């Protein structure tokens, strides 16, 4: 889509550019993860990590699109940078503020907060160290923030905070946060306060190089497991390790899924048995340095149980050459490079959205696509699988080269109707990026009322990479 909405767009200098939702919430805050203003509608937080802020190139920004009965729009938004009032730090070139995002209520006030990674942040004379910041939710949405305690042992160009996840990791009722990047993984334990930050924090010392983390309860004990892909020589898909709580104050056990591979990941109950299931995207093509996988990429589902996923199970494997899945596996499709789970049709089973931002459509290289697969009592199924592109009827725009439709995906209920809507990142749209939304219904997604918002629509005049990250 090359046609832009005409508007006056200011250069990002102060960071908070446009109106927050009209009026504060009057009822008690909802307590929903992702509901930053407490009005009962979940919101979409979208990263634009390579947006210029004033003269600082790739300083980065986060755009919050507030949910409503009609979904999101360009009129209900906030644009936040490190130059925004109350946000720690200063927007500097290469910070890439917004490179990773996670939403959760950290200070137990009923308003969801947002953890933001700036993996290119420099500390003193150390370049590219990385940092994490909590933006606080409230009646008017996100405002102000607190920097997470900064380890002194981070390496230059280590990219700390490239991976962020939040959840109750030890089962004590408080939300915790983990940040990871290269050789440093850290755990921040709740409860958090706005003045003091986390209750405590420490380095997780058993992991090597890892840039990703996924969290969710796969054992049904009320504590979220933390899944870290671990990079190894000879396999760019890595190895999959996860931490499971032994109970509040009792520590964690490190477990391996030796036959699992890939990143990113998402956890939700796909087969309705009460245990979260781990979906992994193995999006790179098989090669000498990548012995497994499928041409064009694949996803695998590892089903949870009372002891977490059984390493001996045969996972569900889905790719574009699987019967019932639209399309065909082709080199560099990147099927599985973006993943999200949520119940689209309200049947009680989590469904899976799979981004393939490298998908070519005719002569349009890397135009991108998103495939939706549905959960069932027997697990993930290809029955009813549907693929969406910007050439799909009702989807705004036109599929063009380098749009990268599906660069990020998120299934979340923006309209409070009990059905997850699909938020799609299109980080190459107009060379600046965009975000598209499709509504969930009892019969699946509908393109009726589908919306597309470009970087220009949300006042990112120099917005690059808008839509490359969406908070889960």
Image (spheres, rainbow, N blue to C red):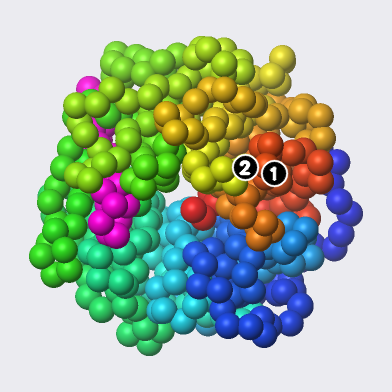
The vertical placement of 440 against 471, above or below, is above
Magenta stretch holds residue 239: yes
Check residue 345 in the rendering and tell me which mark sits there, or answer none: 2
Residue 401 position, x and y percent, is: 70, 26
The location of residue 254, given as percent across then percent down, is 14, 47
Q: Secondary structure at mark 2?
A: loop
Q: Position of residue 88 (x, y in %)?
A: 46, 77
Residue 234 at least partly seen: yes
Bounds of the magenta segment = 217-240
Q: Is residue 465 left or right of residue 24?
A: left
Place of residue 250 in the rendered image (x, y in percent of width and height, measured from the top left):
10, 65
As drawn, 135 above or below 266? below
Disc with the residue nearer the chain's start (1 vs 2): 2
Left or right: 44, with 168 as reference point: right
Left/right of residue 317 with respect to residue 219 in the rendered view: right
Identify the residue under disc 1.
441
Q: Which mark is residue 122?
A: none
């Amino acid at each position: 889509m090359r046609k832009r909405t005409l508007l006056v767009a200011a250069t990002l200098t102060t960071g908070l550019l446009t109106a927050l939702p009209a009026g504060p919430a009057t009822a008690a805050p909802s307590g929903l993860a992702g509901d930053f203003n407490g009005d009962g509608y979940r919101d979409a937080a979208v990263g634009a990590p390579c947006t210029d802020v004033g003269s600082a190139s790739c300083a980065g920004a986060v755009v919050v699109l507030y949910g409503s009965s009609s979904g999101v729009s360009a009129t209900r938004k906030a644009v936040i940078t490190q130059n925004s009032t109350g946000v720690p730090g200063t927007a500097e070139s290469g910070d890439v503020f917004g490179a990773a995002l996670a939403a959760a209520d950290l200070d137990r006030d009923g308003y969801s907060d947002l953890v933001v990674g700036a993996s290119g942040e420099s500390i003193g004379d150390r370049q590219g160290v990385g940092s994490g910041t909590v933006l606080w939710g409230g009646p008017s949405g996100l405002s102000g923030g607190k920097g997470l305690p900064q380890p002194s042992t981070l390496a230059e160009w280590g990219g700390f905070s490239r991976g962020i996840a939040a959840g109750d990791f030890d089962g004590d009722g408080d939300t915790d946060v983990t940040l990871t990047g290269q050789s440093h993984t850290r755990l921040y334990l709740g409860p958090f306060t706005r003045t003091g930050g986390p209750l405590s924090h420490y380095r997780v010392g058993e992991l090597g190089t890892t840039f990703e983390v996924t969290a969710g309860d796969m054992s049904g004990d009320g504590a979220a497991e933390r899944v870290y892909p671990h990079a190894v020589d000879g396999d760019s898909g890595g190895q999959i390790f996860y931490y499971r709580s032994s109970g509040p104050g009792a520590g964690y056990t490190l477990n391996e899924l030796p036959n699992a591979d890939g990143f990113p990941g998402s956890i939700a109950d796909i087969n309705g048995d009460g245990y979260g299931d781990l979906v992994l995207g193995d999006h790179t093509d098989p090669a000498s340095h990548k012995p497994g996988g499928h041409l064009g990429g694949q996803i695998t589902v590892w089903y949870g149980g009372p002891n977490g996923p059984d390493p001996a199970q045969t996972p569900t494997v889905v790719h574009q050459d699987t019967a019932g899945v639209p399309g065909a596996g082709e080199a560099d499709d990147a099927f599985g490079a973006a993943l999200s789970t949520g119940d689209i049709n309200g049947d009680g089973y989590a469904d899976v959205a799979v981004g393939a931002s490298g998908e070519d459509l005719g002569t349009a290289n890397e135009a991108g696509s998103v495939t939706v697969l549905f959960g069932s009592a027997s697990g993930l199924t290809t029955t009813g699988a549907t693929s969406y592109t910007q050439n799909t009827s009702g989807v705004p725009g036109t599929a063009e080269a380098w749009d990268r439709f599906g660069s990020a995906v998120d299934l979340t209920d923006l309209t409070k109707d009990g059905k997850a809507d699909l938020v799609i990142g299109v980080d190459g749209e107009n060379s600046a990026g965009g975000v598209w939304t499709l509504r969930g219904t009892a019969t699946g997604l509908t393109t009726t009322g589908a919306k597309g918002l470009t970087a220009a629509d949300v006042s990112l005049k120099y917005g690059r990479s808008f839509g490359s990250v969406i908070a889960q």
